[in-house]
Image: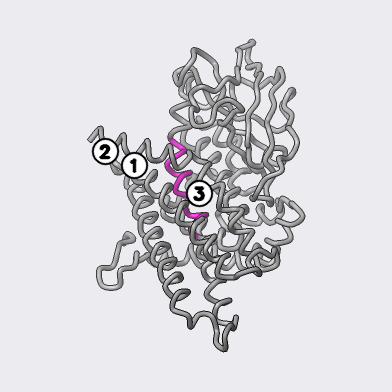
Amino acid sequence: MDAAIDATSGQFELNEDQRAIQEMARSFATDRVAPHALEWDRDKIFPDQTIRETGPLGMGGIYVREDVGGSALGRLDAVLIFEALSAACPAFSSFVSIHNMAAWMIDLFGNDEQRRRFLPKLTSMELLASYCLTEPSSGSDAAALKTRAVLDGDHYVLNGTKQFISGAGDSDVYVTMVRTGEDGPKGISTLVIPKDAPGLSFGANEIKMGWHAQATRQVIFEDCRVPVENRLSDEGQGFRIAMAGLDGGRLNIAACSLGGAQSALDKAVAYTAERKAFGKTINQFQALQFKMADMETELSAARLLLYAAASKLDKKAFDASKWSAMAKRFVTDVGFDVANQALQLHGGYGYLHDYGVEKLVRDLRVHQILEGTNEIMRVIISRHMIGR
């Protein structure tokens, strides 16, 4: 059966397979990610070996077809996985999400030769993938990108720079949007670029507020040569490919916010049950009870909206893009707010690294910016409303 909202319990009821997927991801997160998350954050370690361990569990190609090693799961299944992983470390979960988006683009838009050349090693996590769209002068206005790819025989010669690329310098493959034609969206194409492509280099690792467990660098093309056979679909289809990936990407990053925020709330509930002030545990004060009640309510509402949006995308509903934008906007805003309130409930201890809450606050803040800022989400939602 499909997942559905149970009218009596008010919960989004998952089927047996989905519960098994959720439990598998939770177990991996608890055993292999959570014990190391604070160290990775503190020392800015990219845990590539632990990330590669997700491959044999089917997390390297969650919604990639099975003939190239994918798991052929749905978007709701993916949301369950990323929510579970992010409870241990949102930065870890987010990178796995980005890898999956890049692999999915190759699976959906690549020809058979490209799929068989790239995807078996990506779905197994033998190779890691990054997604390159944003540039120093084009973020929300993605169609204004300037990285130019000029045809030279059976190769493209690329010049330009990509900005804020997660995994840059560590990933093995870069699914990259480049300009092969006219200005605007119709002049954009998609290339799959290996790390060892001549003329490809990387900037310094950015010093960021959060997401310390994954590198963020510029990807720099200086007369970089890429075979024409690495282009996905036809010239001029790149913007369509980029936009096709964003609905799922928005749900994934929302799931990462949800899992991280739930972890922060769980920590706050446990802490307030132990911390004493004025002769009793602080969870006996009604002001804090009310705050935690609101946090629980908002996270539950966020979860229902996210699961509903993922179900719409699975069913290819006509309004799936609107729901994906609504979920991304609401869940990431709620997620950051709940994590920030959880820090407040810890008092001064919440500000200390060892308690793990301030890391969650730092990691979740960027979710309101990437995969389309939450202001852009409002633009998308309102356009659907006006168009209706």
- On the picture, is 337 further left or further right than 330? right
Vertical arrangement, residue 290 with respect to residue 280, above or below: above
Tell me the number on the disc at residue 385: 2
* In front: label 1 or label 2: 2
Compute the Cα span from label 2 to label 3.
24 Å
Q: Is residue 109 magenta?
A: no
Q: Secondary structure at mark 3?
A: helix
Q: Secondary structure at mark 2?
A: helix
What's the magenta region? 244-258
Q: Are marks 2 and 3 in contact (CB under 8 Å)?
A: no
Compute the Cα span from label 1 to label 2.
9 Å
Q: Is residue 253 magenta?
A: yes
Tell me the number on the disc at residue 322: 1
| N-terminal-most mark, 3 or 1 | 3
- On the picture, is 301 further left or further right than 168? left
Q: Are marks 1 and 2 in contact (CB under 8 Å)?
A: yes
Compute the Cα span from label 3 to label 1.
16 Å
Tag 3: amino acid: Ile
Tell me the number on the disc at residue 143: none
On the rendered image, what quadrant is the N terminus found in? bottom left
Q: Residue at x 64, y 21 (%)?
A: 227
Task: Give the main secondary structure of the magenta stretch.
Answer: helix
Tag 1: amino acid: Lys
Q: Quadrant location of residue 149?
A: top right
| N-terminal-most mark, 1 or 2 | 1
| N-terminal-most mark, 2 or 3 | 3
Task: Return the residue at label 3.
Answer: 253
Vertical arrangement, residue 289 with respect to residue 279, above or below: above
In the image shown, does 115 or 338 lie closer to the viewer?
Answer: 338
On the rendered image, what quadrant is the C terminus found in? top left
